[in-house]
């Protein structure tokens, strides 16, 4: 049998059975695709990848035990040629960038699986990169923004957890003035009017996770 006639072998990793079933239903009707393995967390995904060596891995970005992003990094370290498409419920641009930098070949919103899944699988299998339209808009919208520094991300995470400047300064062993300066930078870079909005933007864009 030639490569052209061989179906695209797919591994699905998602902790929601309904998502795995939905993907299986979509793929089941295609003569050029077959699901060879399923996983419900990142650690299982790595084991299934080693067992099946799939052509395409569909990986939920947020899973218990081990996140999809960590599993992506681990698989990519072992098999740099692995073609992995990340699945997510929202299009945070920072999350998209992290996944692509870690080696993801595609990024797909679960809300658009019906419209985009099969085309994405075929495109990535053909060697292309495929990013969900909504995620592309998010990336484009923030492409020119100043990124938060790692120190500012730490401060933003502590803001989101409800800490004041004094508590943040103590936690990070820096002066309160340093924290105030970082908070000003964070508000400016995110276009936020106050700390609460900054935290909300940080979560929405995937800069921080709570």
Image (tube, helix red, strand yellow):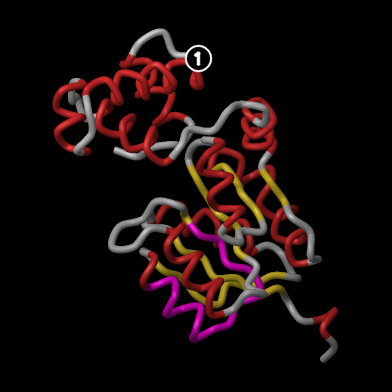
SS state under label 1: loop
Nearest the viewer among 204 and 36 is: 204
Residue at image point 36% right, 20% down:
181
Name the residue beneath numbered marker 1: 191
When asked about the image quadrant of residue 53, the answer is bottom right
Q: Position of residue 15 (x, y in %)?
A: 37, 57
When asked about the image quadrant of residue 91, the answer is top right
Q: How many marks?
A: 1
Farthest top residue in view: 193
- In this rendering, is residue 89 above or below 60? above
The quarter of the picture where the N terminus appears is bottom right
When asked about the image quadrant of residue 4, the answer is bottom right
Nearest the viewer among 112 and 167 is: 167
Nearest the viewer among 24 and 203 is: 203
Mark 1, Cα crowd under 10 Å, few <14 / some 14-19 / many 20+, is few
- In this rendering, is residue 18 above or below 144? below
* Range drawn in magenta: 44-59
Q: Is residue 201 covered in magenta?
A: no
The quarter of the picture where the C terminus appears is top left
Position of 14 with respect to 140 (left or right) is: left
Q: Position of residue 37 (x, y in %)?
A: 50, 75
Position of 163 with respect to 25 (left or right) is: left
Residue at image point 74% right, 55% down:
129
- In this rendering, is residue 116 above or below 184? below
């Amino acid at each position: 049998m030639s490569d052209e006639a061989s179906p695209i072998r797919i591994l699905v990793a998602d902790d929601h059975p309904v998502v795995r079933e939905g993907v299986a239903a979509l793929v089941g009707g295609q003569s050029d695709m077959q699901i060879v393995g399923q996983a419900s967390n990142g650690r299982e995904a790595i084991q299934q990848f080693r067992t099946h060596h799939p052509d395409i891995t569909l990986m939920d970005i947020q899973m218990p035990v081990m996140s999809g992003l960590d599993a992506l990094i681990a698989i990519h370290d072992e098999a740099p040629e692995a073609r992995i498409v990340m699945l997510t419920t929202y299009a945070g641009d920072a999350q998209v960038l992290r996944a692509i930098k870690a080696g993801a070949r595609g990024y797909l919103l679960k809300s658009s699986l019906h419209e985009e899944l099969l085309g994405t699988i075929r495109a990535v299998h053909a060697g292309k990169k495929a990013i969900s339209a909504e995620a592309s808009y998010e990336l484009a919208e923030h492409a020119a923004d100043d990124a938060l520094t790692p120190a500012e991300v730490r401060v933003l995470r502590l803001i989101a957890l409800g800490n004041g400047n004094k508590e943040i300064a103590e936690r990070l062993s820096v002066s309160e003035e340093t924290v105030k300066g970082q908070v000003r930078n964070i508000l400016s870079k995110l276009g936020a009017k106050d700390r609460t909005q900054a935290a909300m933007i940080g979560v929405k864009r995937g800069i921080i996770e709570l």
